[in-house]
Image (cartoon, rainbow, N blue to C red):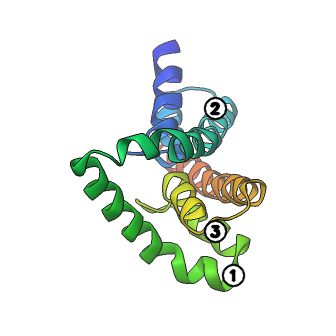
Amino acid sequence: MILDFVLTILWSLSPFGEAKVGIPYGMLNGLNVYLVFIAGFVANVLVFPLMMFFLEKVNQHLLKWRFYKKSAVSIAKRAKLGTGEKIQKYGVFGLIFFVMIPLPGTGVYAGSIAAYIFKMDKRKAFLANTIGIFLSSVFIWTATLLSINDTV
């Protein structure tokens, strides 16, 4: 049970799943559905400050390496392509909508990169990411809860 709770948090922190995977993982493994929601949501919110620290401090040093720079430019182009129009047109609301969509590549990691690229105010970007994560988490939690209840 503790391992499943830890894995729920790790999935929610992971760029390979975020809360979109962490929440269903915890719920499908029989954990308390309310604790799973809170843990998945909070863990996913913590990604934003970690990403901003990485982008502002660590990224500058890693850009000296050719492989990293090539990868970083590719990721930045994808983030800009996926979010650019929405953020430029709708600002904070565009970022909320982008982060909210429960599809691969649209979560807080991409939202943090987009906020960094477009030089958004950090507080507004954090708020937008948090609201987007919350809405996405509610959607995923509800869908998972409904699917669990249908199979019982």
Indicate which disc, 1 or 2, sits on the residue closer to the N terminus. Answer: 2
Query: Of circles 2 and 3, which is in front?
Result: 3
Indicate which disc, 3 or 1, sits on the residue closer to the N terminus. Answer: 1
Residue plotted at (66% across, 53% down): 138
Looking at the picture, tell me which residue is in the foreground, 110 or 62: 62
Looking at the picture, tell me which residue is in the foreground, 104 or 62: 62
Circles 1 and 2: CB distance less than 8 Å? no
Residue plotted at (52% across, 74% down): 83
Looking at the picture, tell me which residue is in the foreground, 124 or 40: 124
Disc 3 to disc 1, C-alpha distance:
8 Å
Query: Of circles 1 and 2, which is in front?
Result: 1
Disc 1 to disc 2, C-alpha distance:
30 Å
Residue plotted at (51% across, 61% down): 102
Image coords of residue 6 (percent x, y): 51, 21
Q: Residue at the far left: name it.
A: 67
Q: Amino acid at mark 2?
A: Ala
Measured along the vertical axis of the image, is residue 126 above or below residue 10? Answer: below
* Residue on which disc 1 sits: 90
Does residue 16 appear to the left or right of 53 in the view shown? Answer: left
Is residue 1 something one can see in this rendering?
no
* Residue on which disc 3 sits: 95
Q: Amino acid at mark 3?
A: Leu
Report crowding for label 3: few under 14, some 14 to 19, many 20 or more residues within 10 A (C-alpha).
many
Q: Amino acid at mark 1?
A: Tyr
The quarter of the picture where residue 81 lies is bottom left
Q: How many marks?
A: 3
* Residue on which disc 2 sits: 39
Indicate which disc, 2 or 3, sits on the residue closer to the N terminus. Answer: 2
Does residue 50 appear to the left or right of 105 in the view shown? Answer: right
Q: Secondary structure at mark 3?
A: helix
Looking at the picture, tell me which residue is in the foreground, 87 or 28: 87
